[in-house]
Amino acid sequence: MNLFKGVITALVTPIKNNHIDETSLRNLVEWQIENGIQGLVPCGTTGESATLSTEEKKEVIHIVIDQARKRVPVITGTGTNNTQESVKLSTWAKEAGADAILAVTPYYNKPSQEGLFRHYSELAKIGLPIILYNVPGRTSLSLSIDTIDRLSKVKNIVAIKEATGSLDFGSQILKSGNDIALISGDDFTFLPLLSIGAQGVISVVSNVIPKEFSELYQHFTEGNLKEAQRIHFKFYPLIQALFIETNPVPVKTALSLMKKISLEFRLPLCEMSPQNSEHLKLTLKNLELI
C-alpha cells in the first residue's frame, strides 16, 4: 500500500462543549473511507492542532487509528516548533499504530535551513515515513530546494506536502531529480500539480466532498483529463469559499451546515462573519451539498 497517493483528507477535529466529540469524529472517519478517500491526517492545521493539548492530540489520533482499522493509512500531524516535543509525540504516535508522520516546518522560532535539516533528521530516526510540510503562510519560513534535496536522502523522509501555492516551486522540487514524492498542500493546485508529476493532495475540501475529489484523482490516473477538469472547475467555487476566512473555520461551518458536526471552535478561532457565512451557504446550496 502506497501511503502517499490520491486524496488524503486533513480531518477537522469535531468539538462539542469544549471537548473532543468522539462520536462525530468516528462518523467522519467512516464517511470518508466509505467515499473512497485514500488517507487521513488527524491533528494537522485543519484539525486545529495549535489549540489542542498534547493529551487531546493523543485522543484524536487514537480515535482515528482505531476507527480506520488499517483500511487507509493514518498520517499523524505531530510536528511542532520544538524538536524534542515533536520526537516525543511522534514516537507515541508510532507506538499507537500511526502509518506515517506529517511534520510542519517549525513555526515562530524561524530556524535556519541547517536547523530545519537537523530537526527533520531527528524525526527521521523514529522509523516512520515522514512527510515534510512546507507552509510558509503559516510558519513564516520555507524549506529551500537545496534543503529538500538534502532531506530526500535521509532515510524515512519520503514526501513533501507543498503548500506555498506556487506551481514554480512544485516544478523545482520535481525537476531536482530526487526521490521525494510531491503532494499538493492546496486544493486549488491539486490538478495542476498532478499534471507535472505530483502523487496526490492532503486536502481540506475533501472533508466536504470526499467522493467527488477522489473521483477527480481516479479520472486523472485513468487518462480522462476532461472529466478531471470538469470536477476541478465544478467545485472550484467551493475551494474558494472554504478559504474565504482562516482554515478550518469555513470547512467546519460547511460540515455543520451538512449536519456532520457541531459548530464549535477553539479560541482564538471563532465563527465566520454573517456575510461570509451566507456566501458559503449559498455555494453549498448551488452544489446541492445542503
Image (cartoon, grey):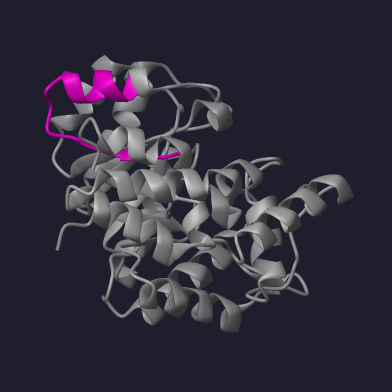
Q: Is residue 289 above or below residue 229?
A: below
Q: Position of residue 49 (x, y in %)?
A: 57, 53
* Location of residue 187 in the rendering, given as x and y in whole percent from the top left corner: 46, 43
Pick the front one: 206 or 68:
206
Q: Is residue 96 above or below residue 232?
A: below
Residue 32 quadrant: bottom left
- Please identify the quadrant where the C terminus is shown: bottom right
Q: Between residues 62 and 74, which one lies in front from this camera angle? A: 74
Can you tell which quarter of the image residue 198 is in?
top left
Name which quarter of the figure residue 19 lies in: bottom right
Quadrant containing the N terminus in the rendered view: bottom left
Which stretch appears magenta?
169-186
User: Residue at left 51%, top 69%?
Assistant: 60
Q: Residue at x 72, y 73 (%)?
A: 262
Determine if the magenta segment contains residue 175.
yes
Q: Write the residue at 20% across / 42% down.
A: 158
Looking at the image, can residue 35 be seen?
Answer: yes
Q: Count the marks: how many?
A: 0
